[in-house]
């Protein structure tokens, strides 16, 4: 009997939600397990790095790597998975675009470490002790991975074949991707495995979106009563639908919350944040600087809003010093 | 224009590189008028003609910076004069938000400017380009392409370290 195709999962700078989404396959996971051999999955199975190292190069059919790359350990593991796999899929927003960890690109490494080890309200560290990369003691040498200055998406570190978008990807998209892989019906390399349409196109509230939005203020979801049937933008709530790829079938919208952009842009857009900024700002009602600024002042955090998942892959990548 | 480019590329003497997006109906015509009138102004602005300031996608601006522009100038018709009625207002709204966002991301405000210059204001093209060139010169190079290379050196150094010793501890 021929070997079953080998599949690996790995996590880098991520929250564990992507792992959860694999489990969310529910009973379908049994079909997956029946069809493939899982050879690495740190969250669920006891395989070690050396097990993967011992495998021949390109012997894994596909590695699904989630999480951004923030440390040297993640870089090393990403490179190892690449070497041992025919295909690598960047799984979820962080691997795809840097994700939430990528927001740390608004700060330098030193600012992050200083806050965590010295300034944060819950820290008591009078000696200002910082973790060392290498500590030699009687018991031996202990090392820690290096913490990079820049957070990166997976394809900024290794070659990536496909992207499964989402924070996390939906079980439906994962199932479709696995079926396509096992059937050998693969799209062109570099494809994002989700429809190439904006979320607004598949939004259940599409018909209630007016052609002119004429924003005079932006409301935040917690501060207003949201009508569950009407376009969120029409209710002055910032929704990233116009510049975000569809395919999630509007899960957040169905939960009466706006899209925050986790599927990234469509293939026609290079920089998601710039595009959504453009779509939103151009529909402000005011025509003078003062009036425009007053409306814009109701967006408390433009970078965190428009680049929530994509700062590392944006045109500027990171805060300039 | 060419000489400024050569200088900055060869590294002899840095000259500010400014990308200027001018609308076809007003500011580009004004720049044309400046040329015909033999008005001399700083050669640092590379002018790109667009049909309307409202056509300037914020991606163009960020792309210019990411490819080595030190400043970006947008020229459009005065409020009320847009050939397409509302395009310049859209440009103004985007500019206001983009300015705020770029400040947060560490790009100095003076590197990005929006000006209304009508077709008859050839002299104003000169004033604005000269002013902006001097302001950007005072700020120094933005140099994003060089910064990107600098940022990614941490990967190279680690590559070396990983291949060199291989005793990194993993969880």
Image (cartoon, rainbow, N blue to C red):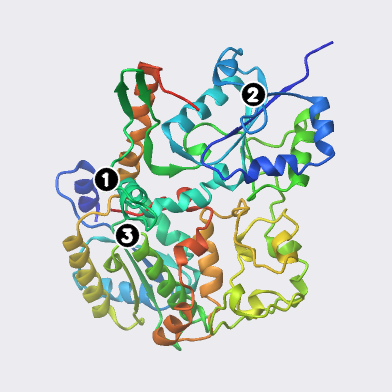
Q: Is residue B74 above or below residue A24?
A: below
Q: Identify which residue is drawn at 20% across, 70% down.
A: B130
Percent coordinates x, y for residue A40 in the rendering: 64, 25
Q: Are marks 1 and 3 in contact (CB under 8 Å)?
A: no
Among all residues in the image, which is located at the extreme bottom? B80
A31 horizontally vs A47: left or right: right
Q: Which residue is mark 3?
A: B106
Q: Is residue B62 above or below residue B132?
A: above
Label 1: element kind? loop
Q: What whole-number distance in Å separates the C-alpha atoms at marks 1 and 3?
A: 28 Å
Q: What whole-number distance in Å separates the C-alpha atoms at marks 3 and 2?
A: 44 Å
A244 horizontally vs A301: left or right: right
Q: Are the residues under badges 1 and 3 in a single subunit?
A: no
Q: Are marks 1 and 2 in contact (CB under 8 Å)?
A: no
Q: Identify which residue is drawn at 53% across, 47% down.
A: A97
Q: Identify which residue is drawn at 66% across, 40% down.
A: A19
Percent coordinates x, y for residue A64 in the rendering: 64, 33
Which chain's residue wears label 1?
A
> Which is nearer the eye, B108 or A167?
A167
Crowd around label 1: few <14 · some 14–19 · many ≥20 (10 Å): few
The answer to whether one can see residue A44 in this image is: yes
Q: Which residue is mark 2?
A: A46
Identify the image quadrant of the N terminus of chain A: top right
Crowd around label 2: few <14 · some 14–19 · many ≥20 (10 Å): few
């Amino acid at each position: 009997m021929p070997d079953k195709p080998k599949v690996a999962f790995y996590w880098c700078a991520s929250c564990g939600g992507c792992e959860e989404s694999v489990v969310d396959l529910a009973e379908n996971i049994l079909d997956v397990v029946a069809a493939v051999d899982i050879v690495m999955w740190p969250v669920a199975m006891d395989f070690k790095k050396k097990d993967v190292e011992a495998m021949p190069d390109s012997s894994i059919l596909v590695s699904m790597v989630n999480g951004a790359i923030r440390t040297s350990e993640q870089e090393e593991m990403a490179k190892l998975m690449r070497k041992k796999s025919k295909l690598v899929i960047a799984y979820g927003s962080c691997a795809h675009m840097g994700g939430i960890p990528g927001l740390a690109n608004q700060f330098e490494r030193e600012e992050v470490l200083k806050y965590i080890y010295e300034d944060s309200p819950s820290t008591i560290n009078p000696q200002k002790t910082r973790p060392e990369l290498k500590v030699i003691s009687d018991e031996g040498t202990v090392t820690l991975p290096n913490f990079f200055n820049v957070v990166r998406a997976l394809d900024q570190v290794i070659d990536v074949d496909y992207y499964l978008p989402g924070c996390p990807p939906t079980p439906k998209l994962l199932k479709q991707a696995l079926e396509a892989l096992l059937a050998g019906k693969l799209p062109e390399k570099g494809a994002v495995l989700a429809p190439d349409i904006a979320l607004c196109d598949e939004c259940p509230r599409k018909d209630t979106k007016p052609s002119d939005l004429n924003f005079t203020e932006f409301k935040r979801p917690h501060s207003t009563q949201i009508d569950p049937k009407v376009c969120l933008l029409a209710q002055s709530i910032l929704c990233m639908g116009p510049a975000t790829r569809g395919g999630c079938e509007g899960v957040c919208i169905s939960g009466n919350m706006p899209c925050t952009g986790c599927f990234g842009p469509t293939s026609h857009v290079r920089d998601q944040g710039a595009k959504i900024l453009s779509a939103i700002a151009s529909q402000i009602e005011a025509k003078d600087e003062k009036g425009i600024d007053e409306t814009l002042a109701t967006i408390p955090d433009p970078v965190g809003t428009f680049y929530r998942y994509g700062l590392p892959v944006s045109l500027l990548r990171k805060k300039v010093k | 224009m060419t000489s400024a480019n050569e200088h900055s590329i060869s590294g002899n003497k840095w000259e500010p590189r400014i990308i200027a997006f001018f609308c076809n109906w007003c500011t580009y015509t004004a720049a044309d008028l400046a040329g015909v009138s033999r008005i001399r102004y700083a050669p640092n602005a590379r002018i790109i003609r667009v049909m309307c300031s409202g056509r300037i996608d914020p991606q163009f601006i960020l792309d210019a910076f990411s490819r080595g522009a030190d400043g970006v100038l947008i020229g459009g018709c005065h409020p009320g004069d847009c050939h397409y009625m509302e395009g310049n207002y859209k440009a103004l709204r985007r500019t206001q938000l983009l300015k705020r966002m770029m400040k947060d991301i560490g790009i100095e405000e003076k590197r990005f400017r929006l000006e209304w210059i009508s077709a008859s204001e050839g002299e104003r093209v000169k004033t604005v380009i000269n002013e902006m060139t001097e302001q950007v010169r005072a700020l120094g190079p933005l140099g994003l392409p060089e910064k990107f290379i600098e940022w990614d050196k941490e990967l190279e150094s680690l590559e070396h370290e990983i291949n060199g010793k291989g005793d990194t501890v993993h969880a």
